[in-house]
Image: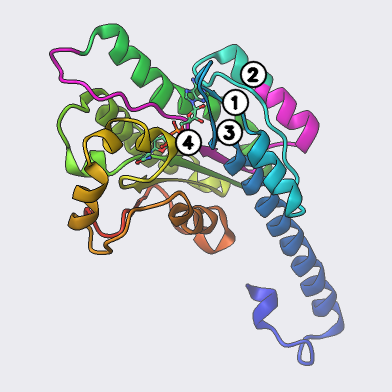
Amino acid sequence: MIAENRSRSTAKKGERQYVDRETRRRDGRRQRHRASLLQAVGCARRQDRHRGLADCAETVGAIKKNAGTAIAVRCDQTSEADVAKLRATVEKELGGCDILVHCAGIYPTAAIDEITFEQWRKVLSVNLDSVFLLVKAFLPAMKEQRWGRIISVSSTTFHSGIAFNTHYTASKGGLIGFARSLASEVGDFGITVNTIAPGLTRTDTTVNGKPGEFGWFDMIREQQAIKRTETPEDLTGTLAFLASEDAAFITGQTIVVDGGWRFS
Ligand SMILES: NC(=O)c1ccc[n+]([C@@H]2O[C@H](COP(=O)([O-])OP(=O)(O)OC[C@H]3O[C@@H](n4cnc5c(N)ncnc54)[C@H](O)[C@@H]3O)[C@@H](O)[C@H]2O)c1
């Protein structure tokens, strides 16, 4: 910002060189971060129905087509060993992780009477343990470079408390608490930690799952201020903003992106 706000004609020679160097450094960093964001966003778009893990070939192809850099790494984010391998691959192939977007999640619907402890553990593990493992893996390098962005995808089920989602809602509330506490811990390292809370969003899993089956799209759309169904593209602007320098002073927050369904 300093560089942008200063006129070339009024800056002295020494200052100008400093300003140019700073501008180049910042622009380079922004480009790197934009590329990293695309890489990160590409991590969880497609469901591989056989293994429950993403096959990102289509997303990687789309990023590369748009002159981005992308790799796909198969990783069970509930496995410490898999996450360690992910970190090693990211460091080798991309030089590290500046922006970590945690999006993996499962959302089975069931009454509390029906949820077994095993099912409870599974939801908590995929939705919440995963962010712990990813942060443990990538935070040290962010601290070392004194810059980083950590963004996780929560849900407005936390704000609305809809029935038959106790395990899911507990896990998504956990992400919000995790972000608040971690934000306070790492703010001095130039690292921000935030969450995005989407409303009901049209994805393969929601369309083919309970939301589609029970007509929730129509019901929730009518309750929103903006009466159309949310799509994944509605989330990318907020994601890019939180990852950018413009959001450097926003941390520990949850941004609700749901067309005005719930007001936080
Ligand atoms: N779609 C919605 O209405 C909605 C609303 C609010 C929040 N969310 C959240 O957004 C995220 C994406 O939801 P979606 O609708 O795109 O679902 P989705 O099923 O399409 O995506 C979930 C992704 O998580 C990955 N995943 C599952 N288990 C994993 C594991 N152990 N390790 C690594 N990856 C794993 C899957 O491969 C898949 O790519 C989830 O966290 C979900 O809770 C979705």
From the viewer's perspective, is the residue at label 4 or at label 3 nearer? 4
Q: In percent of the image, x 37 and y 14: which residue is there? A: 122
Residue 182 coordinates in the image, percent (x, y): 43, 37
Residue placed under numbered mark 2 in the picture: 84
The range drawn in magenta is 86-114
Kindly identify the amino acid type of the residue bearing the numbered disc 2.
Ala
Helix, strand or loop under label 2: helix
Can you tell which quarter of the image residue 6 is in? bottom right
Q: CA distance from mark 4 to mark 2?
A: 18 Å
Tell me if residue 105 is in the magenta stretch: yes
- Residue situated in front as seen by the camera: 87 or 212: 212
- Crowding at dot 2, Cα within 10 Å, few <14 / some 14-19 / many 20+, comes out as some
Helix, strand or loop under label 3: helix
Helix, strand or loop under label 4: loop
Q: CA distance from mark 4 to mark 3?
A: 17 Å
Kindly identify the amino acid type of the residue bearing the numbered disc 1.
Ala
Kindly identify the amino acid type of the residue bearing the numbered disc 3.
Leu
- Residue situated in front as seen by the camera: 256 or 59: 59
Question: CB of mark 3 within 8 Å of CB of mark 1?
Answer: yes
Helix, strand or loop under label 1: helix
Residue 103's mark?
Answer: 4
Image height of 33 relative to 155, above or below: below
